């Protein structure tokens, strides 16, 4: 060490500055505006076009038509990459990315969302 004073001044600067970490579990997390979290689905807007299902790179969305002209949507959050392609491709804006990020679960079945939808009228 040719300059021990340089190391000491740097150590004092680091000790005296404010911490950059967040106290997350005890304080609310600071989430950015364009954060892509859990997928929110508005069944009243869905027309059953299946564009979201076709655009999903991880095949996390399945849409089936039942005989009673009801759409059944299945979203598997454990497969979702949270890329937002499904929300961008939805013509009627029935899908939206939320800021919910606490999705840890012991059982995978809790990460599967089944939704039955009466299709909206195309205007």
Image (cartoon, grey):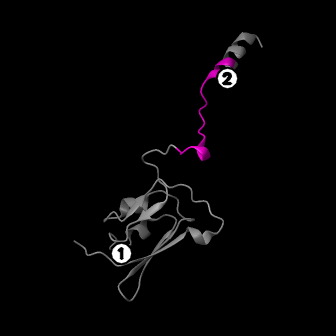
Q: Residue at x 60, y 40 (%)?
A: 23
- Residue 50 spot, x, y in % from top left: 38, 72
Residue 37 tag number: none
Q: Return the residue nearer the eye: 62 or 40.
A: 40
Q: Earlier in the sequence, mark 1 or mark 2?
A: 2
Q: Secondary structure at mark 2?
A: helix
Q: Which residues are magenta?
A: 12-29
Q: Is residue 101 magenta?
A: no
Displayed quadrant of residue 3? top right
Give the Cα distance between marks 1 and 2: 58 Å
Q: Position of residue 4 (x, y in %)?
A: 75, 12
Q: Specify the quadrant of the image occupied by residue 43.
A: bottom left
Where the C terminus falls, by quadrant? bottom left
**Disc 2 designates what residue?**
15
Q: Is residue 25 above or below residue 65?
A: above
Q: Residue furthest bottom?
A: 67
Mark carried by residue 48 = 1
Q: Is residue 41 above or below residue 25?
A: below
- Where does the image place residue 35, in percent across and percent down from the top left? 46, 49
């Amino acid at each position: 060490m040719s300059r021990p004073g340089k190391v000491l001044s740097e150590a004092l600067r680091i000790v005296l500055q404010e911490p950059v970490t967040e106290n997350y579990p005890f304080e609310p997390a600071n989430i950015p505006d364009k954060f892509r979290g859990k997928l929110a689905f508005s069944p009243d807007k869905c027309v059953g076009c299946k564009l979201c299902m076709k655009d999903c790179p991880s095949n996390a969305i399945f849409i089936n038509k039942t005989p009673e002209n009801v759409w059944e949507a299945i979203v598997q959050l454990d497969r979702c990459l949270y890329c937002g392609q499904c929300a961008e491709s939805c013509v009627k804006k029935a899908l939206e990315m939320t800021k919910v990020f606490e999705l840890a679960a012991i059982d995978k079945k809790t990460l599967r969302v089944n939704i039955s939808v009466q299709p909206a009228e195309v205007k």
